[in-house]
Image: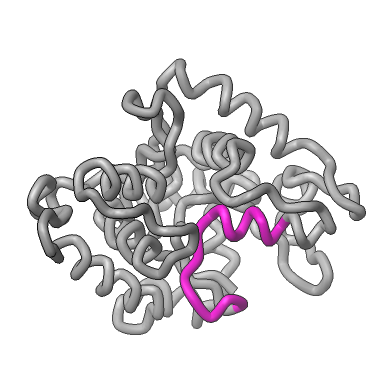
Amino acid sequence: MKAWPALLLIATALPAWARSGFEQLSPALQAMQRDDAQNPAMLWVQDGAQLWTRGPDKACASCHGDARQSMVGVAARYPAFDTRSARPLNLAQRVNQCRSVHQGRPPWPPENAELLGLTAFIGLQSRGLPLAPPTDARLEPARARGRVLFNARIGQLNLSCAICHQANVGQRLAGSLIPPGHANGYPLYRLEWQGLGSLQRRLRNCMSGVRAEPFAWDAQELLDLELYLAQRGAGLPIETPAVRP
């Protein structure tokens, strides 16, 4: 109990951009995220739990066993370098690769409800663990490109990710509170979407919001940004599936 004041002091000393967006939520939304019975994202998680054990031939569980044991900490380490494809993959891409290579099924398209549910179920197994991006030299070129993209001004509004989500966290843009822009809760439920969505969906939304042409789904640029955001948020607790406005 005596350690709490020091921990709180450290948390208070962090710059606004280094904190989880959870801290900006209203008490009602914080309660919704904390309570699995209220968190609407858990509907997708329940579907993902069923997909984990469902055939018809080879289910995820047939190789990986009980996700509550085998998947602990996995989501905290993605995106990661994949030796089979010789490139970085995010968690959804890894799920699709496994689906194609080991289950002999076609990959799910981006934002497919089943893909979101399964990745949210896997992410849930790491909830509360710190985001721990791999220290893999093979990822560094992509991470460096992601840093450049994060700081690059784009669109008709001539804004960068950093201008909003680092320099002006807590301010308002078009009436909305600017969050720190961390990736530690995805897939997450947004009230604006009335559904679960991926980090790529949010990045593409931001690009549209500044009147720029969004990168295509699964474009290398989006993965570069995901890698940099994982490094930027290293140490933050995994909140999957989070709730946001």
- Mark yes or no: residue 57 visible: yes
In which quadrant will I find the C terminus? bottom right
User: Residue 191's image quarter?
Assistant: bottom right
In the image, the segment drawn in magenta is 192-206
In the rendered image, the vertical position of residue 123 relative to residue 227, given as above or below: below
Residue drawn at point x = 43 percent, y = 65 percent: 112
Expressed as whole percent of the image width and height from the top left, the position of residue 17 reads 64, 48
Closest to the observer, 242 or 19: 242
Residue drawn at point x = 78 percent, y = 52 percent: 213
In the rendered image, the vertical position of residue 119 relative to residue 82, given as above or below: below
- Mark yes or no: residue 1 visible: no
Q: Is residue 204 magenta?
A: yes
Closest to the observer, 135 or 205: 205
Closest to the observer, 18 or 116: 116
Task: Judge from the rendering whether residue 26 lies leftward or rightward of residue 234; answer left or right.
Answer: right
In which quadrant will I find the N terminus? bottom left
Expressed as whole percent of the image width and height from the top left, the position of residue 141 reads 57, 20
User: Residue 50's image quarter?
Assistant: bottom left
Here the colouring is one colour
User: Residue 59's image quarter?
Assistant: bottom left
Task: Judge from the rendering whether residue 17 lies leftward or rightward of residue 138; answer left or right.
Answer: right
Task: Judge from the rendering whether residue 14 lies leftward or rightward of residue 127; answer left or right.
Answer: right
Residue drawn at point x = 10 percent, y = 58 percent: 57
In the rendered image, the vertical position of residue 36 relative to residue 100, given as above or below: below
Q: Is residue 32 magenta?
A: no
Expressed as whole percent of the image width and height from the top left, the position of residue 94 reads 35, 43
Residue drawn at point x = 20 percent, y = 50 percent: 103
Task: Judge from the rendering whether residue 243 lies leftward or rightward of residue 220; answer left or right.
Answer: left
